[in-house]
Amino acid sequence: MRVVLLGPPGAGKGTQAQVIAARLSVPAISTGDIFRANVTSQTDLGKQAKAYMDAGDLVPDEITVAMVSDRLAEPDAKAGFLLDGFPRTIAQAEQLRDSLAEMGNRLDRCLELVVDEEELVRRLSGRRVSVDGEMVQREDDKPETVRHRLEVYREQTAPLAGFYDEVGLLSRIDAIGEIDEVTRRALEALGADEALADEPDDESGR
C-alpha cells in the first residue's frame, strides 16, 4: 500500500501517520526526517539542501524529490509506505508519480484528513507550553495566527487534493473523533481489511 496523507495543522496528521503506517506494516516517511537524515549524514543531496537552507532559501523541488525517491527505494519501503508532508505542490506530486513509475510502482491512495475550521482553531489555540514554569500560549497558536496558517494550507493544498481527486485517488476522511475511530475510517477508505481485522475488540486491547 502506497499512501500520501494530507491534513491541516491540528487535524492529528502526525499521530494518524504513525498509527495507520503501523497498521499497514509500512514505514511512515516524513520530509522532515528525510531532510535531517541527509543533512546529518552529509550526503550529496543533503549538502545541496543545506546550502539553500543556510541561505534562507527554499530547497528546489528536484532536490527534495530526489531525496524522497532515494528513501522510497530503500528495502523497508519496497512493499509500501505512507508519506507525511510530501508532496506539497502539484509539481511535486507529478514528480513523485514519475519517480514511482521509474521504480515500477504507483501511488494507491491519497487520504485527506478533514476537520471543521472552528474545531481546528479550538484545538490549536488551546495548546499551552511551559515557559519558566508557567503554561503560556505560543504566538503561532493564537487564534488569528492559526486562521492565517489554515488559509495558507488551503491555498497550497486545495489544488493538490484536486489533483489526486481528478485521477481518482483521493479519499476525504472525517478526522473528528477518537484516534482509533479516525484510523478505522482511514483503513476502510484504503480497503485495508486485514488491518481492520487486527483491531482490538475494545479499548482494553482484549
Image: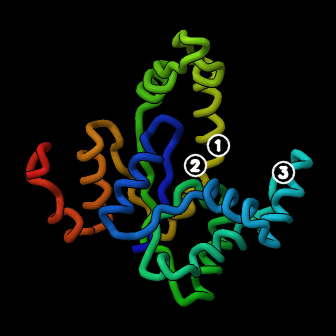
Q: Residue at x 44, y 61 (%)?
A: 170
Disc 1 secondary structure class: helix
What x and y, as percent, mark residue 117? 47, 29
The residue indicated by pointer 2 is: 158
The residue indicated by pointer 1 is: 155
In this rendered view, identify the residue nearer to me: 170 or 42: 42
Tags 1 and 2 touching, CB below 8 Å: yes
Q: Nearer the viewer, mark 3 or mark 1?
A: 3
User: Are there few (<14), some (14-19), or many (20+) residues within 10 Å of tag 3?
Assistant: few
What x and y, as percent, mark residue 37? 67, 62
Q: Residue at x 53, y 37 (%)?
A: 9
* Above-or-below relation of 156 to 194: above
Tags 3 and 2 touching, CB below 8 Å: no
Q: Amino acid at mark 1?
A: Glu
* Above-or-below relation of 140 to 204: above
In the picture, the quarter occupied by the N terminus is: bottom left
Disc 3 secondary structure class: helix
Q: Is residue 165 visible?
A: no
- The answer to whether 195 appears left or right of 3 in the picture is left
What x and y, as percent, mark residue 53? 84, 51
User: Are there few (<14), some (14-19), or many (20+) residues within 10 Å of tag 1?
Assistant: few
Q: Amino acid at mark 2?
A: Ala
Q: Amino acid at mark 3?
A: Met
Q: Residue at x 20, y 71 (%)?
A: 194
**What colour scheme was applied to this rendering of the protein?**
rainbow
Disc 2 secondary structure class: helix
User: Are there few (<14), some (14-19), or many (20+) residues within 10 Å of tag 2?
Assistant: few
What x and y, as percent, mark residue 182? 29, 46
